[in-house]
Image (cartoon, rainbow, N blue to C red):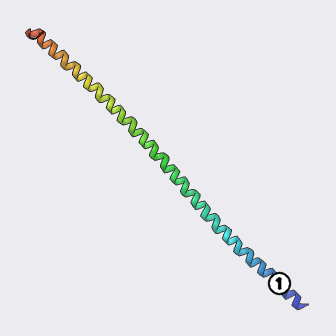
Amino acid sequence: MKREMILSLSAVALSLACAGAVGAQSTKQAIKHDAKTAGHAIGDGAREVGHATRDVAIKVGHGARDAGRGIGKGAREGWDATKHGFKEVFHKGG
């Protein structure tokens, strides 16, 4: 009877040890999976920030370009008005 009980306890201990090893493996895999998911989330967030930064830079650049065109047009109109006024005052040109 004692021998049967020892064999039963040994079988139980062996099955618990195997279950513990499997549990440790699944925990390790879960940690790896969570780390991988977090890494992907960080990468996706960084990509979104980069795209937003690019979009803002393009809009600022286009605004500066348009402002430069407006300033250039205004300067040209000012020059033309000054030239026209000079010609009228001094009766030069056509």
The quadrant of the rendering that contains the C terminus is top left
**Label 1, on which residue?**
9
Judged left or right of residue 43, residue 92 is left
Q: Residue at x 52, y 54 (%)?
A: 42
Instruction: State which quadrant residue 13 falls in.
Output: bottom right
Q: Residue at x 70, y 70 (%)?
A: 23
Q: Position of residue 79 (x, y in %)?
A: 18, 20
Judged left or right of residue 6, residue 17 is left
The quadrant of the rendering that contains the N terminus is bottom right
Q: Position of residue 7 (x, y in %)?
A: 84, 87
Q: Position of residue 58 (x, y in %)?
A: 39, 37
Q: Residue at x 55, y 53 (%)?
A: 41
Q: Is residue 42 above or below residue 84?
A: below
Secondary structure found at label 1 = helix
Q: Amino acid at mark 1?
A: Leu
Q: Residue at x 15, y 12 (%)?
A: 85
Instruction: State which quadrant residue 34 falls in.
Output: bottom right
Q: Is residue 16 above or below residue 31?
A: below
Q: Residue furthest front?
A: 94
Judged left or right of residue 37, residue 9 is right
Q: Is residue 36 above or below residue 92?
A: below
